[in-house]
Amino acid sequence: MGNVIPYKIQIISIVGSLLFMFFIFRLITKGKLREEYSIVWIFCTIALLLFAIWRDGLDIIAKFLGVYYAPALIFLGAIFAIIVFLVHLSVVNSKQQGQIKQLAQELALLKEKMENKQKEDGKNG
Protein backbone atom coordinates (compact mmCIF):
# COMPACT_ATOMS: atom_id res chain seq x y z
CA MET A 1 0.00 0.00 0.00
CA GLY A 2 2.93 2.35 0.71
CA ASN A 3 4.21 2.05 -2.88
CA VAL A 4 0.88 3.12 -4.39
CA ILE A 5 1.14 6.80 -3.42
CA PRO A 6 4.45 7.53 -5.23
CA TYR A 7 2.95 6.04 -8.38
CA LYS A 8 -0.14 8.23 -8.00
CA ILE A 9 2.08 11.29 -7.75
CA GLN A 10 4.08 10.11 -10.76
CA ILE A 11 0.92 9.57 -12.82
CA ILE A 12 -0.45 12.97 -11.79
CA SER A 13 2.87 14.59 -12.75
CA ILE A 14 2.92 12.88 -16.15
CA VAL A 15 -0.71 13.76 -16.90
CA GLY A 16 -0.20 17.33 -15.71
CA SER A 17 2.89 17.75 -17.90
CA LEU A 18 1.10 16.33 -20.94
CA LEU A 19 -1.92 18.59 -20.36
CA PHE A 20 0.37 21.60 -20.07
CA MET A 21 2.11 20.61 -23.32
CA PHE A 22 -1.29 20.31 -25.00
CA PHE A 23 -2.23 23.75 -23.65
CA ILE A 24 0.96 25.27 -25.11
CA PHE A 25 0.29 23.68 -28.51
CA ARG A 26 -3.29 25.00 -28.46
CA LEU A 27 -2.02 28.52 -27.77
CA ILE A 28 0.39 28.21 -30.69
CA THR A 29 -2.27 26.96 -33.12
CA LYS A 30 -4.69 29.71 -32.07
CA GLY A 31 -1.96 32.30 -32.67
CA LYS A 32 -1.95 33.49 -29.06
CA LEU A 33 1.63 32.37 -28.40
CA ARG A 34 4.47 32.91 -30.84
CA GLU A 35 6.71 29.98 -31.63
CA GLU A 36 9.85 31.72 -30.34
CA TYR A 37 8.33 32.02 -26.87
CA SER A 38 6.77 28.58 -26.92
CA ILE A 39 10.18 26.91 -27.22
CA VAL A 40 11.01 27.86 -23.63
CA TRP A 41 7.72 26.42 -22.37
CA ILE A 42 8.10 23.24 -24.43
CA PHE A 43 11.63 22.64 -23.06
CA CYS A 44 10.41 23.22 -19.49
CA THR A 45 7.53 20.82 -20.00
CA ILE A 46 9.84 18.18 -21.49
CA ALA A 47 12.12 18.53 -18.44
CA LEU A 48 9.14 18.13 -16.09
CA LEU A 49 7.93 15.12 -18.06
CA LEU A 50 11.41 13.59 -18.04
CA PHE A 51 11.70 13.90 -14.25
CA ALA A 52 8.13 12.62 -13.79
CA ILE A 53 8.97 9.48 -15.77
CA TRP A 54 12.58 9.02 -14.56
CA ARG A 55 12.02 9.26 -10.82
CA ASP A 56 15.64 8.86 -9.74
CA GLY A 57 16.93 11.25 -12.40
CA LEU A 58 16.84 14.33 -10.25
CA ASP A 59 18.77 12.62 -7.45
CA ILE A 60 21.39 11.31 -9.89
CA ILE A 61 21.89 14.71 -11.54
CA ALA A 62 21.98 16.47 -8.15
CA LYS A 63 24.67 14.08 -6.86
CA PHE A 64 26.67 14.55 -10.07
CA LEU A 65 26.54 18.34 -9.67
CA GLY A 66 27.27 18.22 -5.94
CA VAL A 67 23.86 19.46 -4.84
CA TYR A 68 22.93 17.91 -1.50
CA TYR A 69 19.18 18.59 -1.64
CA ALA A 70 17.87 17.46 -5.03
CA PRO A 71 14.69 19.62 -5.11
CA ALA A 72 16.94 22.69 -4.77
CA LEU A 73 18.22 21.82 -8.24
CA ILE A 74 14.71 22.38 -9.63
CA PHE A 75 14.58 25.83 -8.05
CA LEU A 76 18.05 26.65 -9.36
CA GLY A 77 17.02 25.59 -12.87
CA ALA A 78 13.77 27.55 -12.63
CA ILE A 79 15.54 30.70 -11.43
CA PHE A 80 18.09 30.39 -14.24
CA ALA A 81 15.33 29.90 -16.84
CA ILE A 82 13.41 32.90 -15.50
CA ILE A 83 16.50 35.11 -15.65
CA VAL A 84 17.27 34.06 -19.23
CA PHE A 85 13.65 34.61 -20.24
CA LEU A 86 13.55 38.06 -18.59
CA VAL A 87 16.73 39.11 -20.39
CA HIS A 88 15.21 37.94 -23.67
CA LEU A 89 12.02 39.91 -23.01
CA SER A 90 14.08 42.99 -22.14
CA VAL A 91 15.90 42.73 -25.47
CA VAL A 92 12.61 42.36 -27.35
CA ASN A 93 11.10 45.28 -25.42
CA SER A 94 14.08 47.52 -26.18
CA LYS A 95 13.91 46.64 -29.86
CA GLN A 96 10.18 47.40 -29.98
CA GLN A 97 10.65 50.74 -28.20
CA GLY A 98 13.15 51.74 -30.89
CA GLN A 99 10.72 50.68 -33.61
CA ILE A 100 7.88 52.62 -31.99
CA LYS A 101 10.04 55.74 -31.76
CA GLN A 102 10.98 55.44 -35.43
CA LEU A 103 7.35 54.91 -36.46
CA ALA A 104 6.24 57.94 -34.44
CA GLN A 105 8.87 60.09 -36.12
CA GLU A 106 7.87 58.87 -39.58
CA LEU A 107 4.21 59.49 -38.77
CA ALA A 108 4.99 63.05 -37.65
CA LEU A 109 6.88 63.71 -40.90
CA LEU A 110 4.03 62.29 -42.99
CA LYS A 111 1.49 64.36 -41.05
CA GLU A 112 3.54 67.50 -41.62
CA LYS A 113 3.79 66.75 -45.37
CA MET A 114 0.02 66.22 -45.58
CA GLU A 115 -0.68 69.51 -43.78
CA ASN A 116 1.72 71.35 -46.07
CA LYS A 117 0.09 69.73 -49.11
CA GLN A 118 -3.38 70.74 -47.90
CA LYS A 119 -2.19 74.32 -47.37
CA GLU A 120 -0.76 74.42 -50.90
CA ASP A 121 -3.99 73.02 -52.33
CA GLY A 122 -5.99 75.62 -50.38
CA LYS A 123 -3.90 78.46 -51.81
CA ASN A 124 -4.13 77.11 -55.37
CA GLY A 125 -7.84 76.29 -55.18
Image: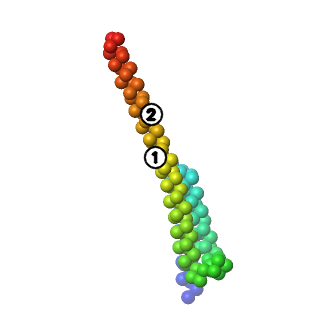
Near-viewer residue (60 or 101): 101
Q: Which residue is mark 1?
A: 97
At 57% from the left and 65% from the top, the residue drawn is 44
Kindly identify which residue carries mark 2. Answer: 106
Amino acid carrying label 2: it is: Glu
Task: Return the x and y of residue 48 as percentages of the image width and height.
Answer: 58, 69
Q: Is residue 123 above or below residue 66?
A: above
- Is 87 rendered above or below residue 49? above
Crowding around mark 1 (Cα neighbors within 10 Å: few <14, some 14 to 19, many 20+) is few
Q: In x, y percent, where is residue 82? A: 52, 64
**Residue drawn where x is 56% and y is 52% of the image:** 35
Residue shown at the point (43%, 36%) measured from the top left:
105
Disc 1 marks a residue whose amino acid type is Gln
Q: CA distance from mark 1 to mark 2?
A: 14 Å
Q: How far from the left and from the top, in percent, is residue 61?
A: 65, 76
Foreground: 89 or 22? 89
In the image, 7 versus 44, the foreground residue is 44
Q: Quadrant of the C terminus?
A: top left
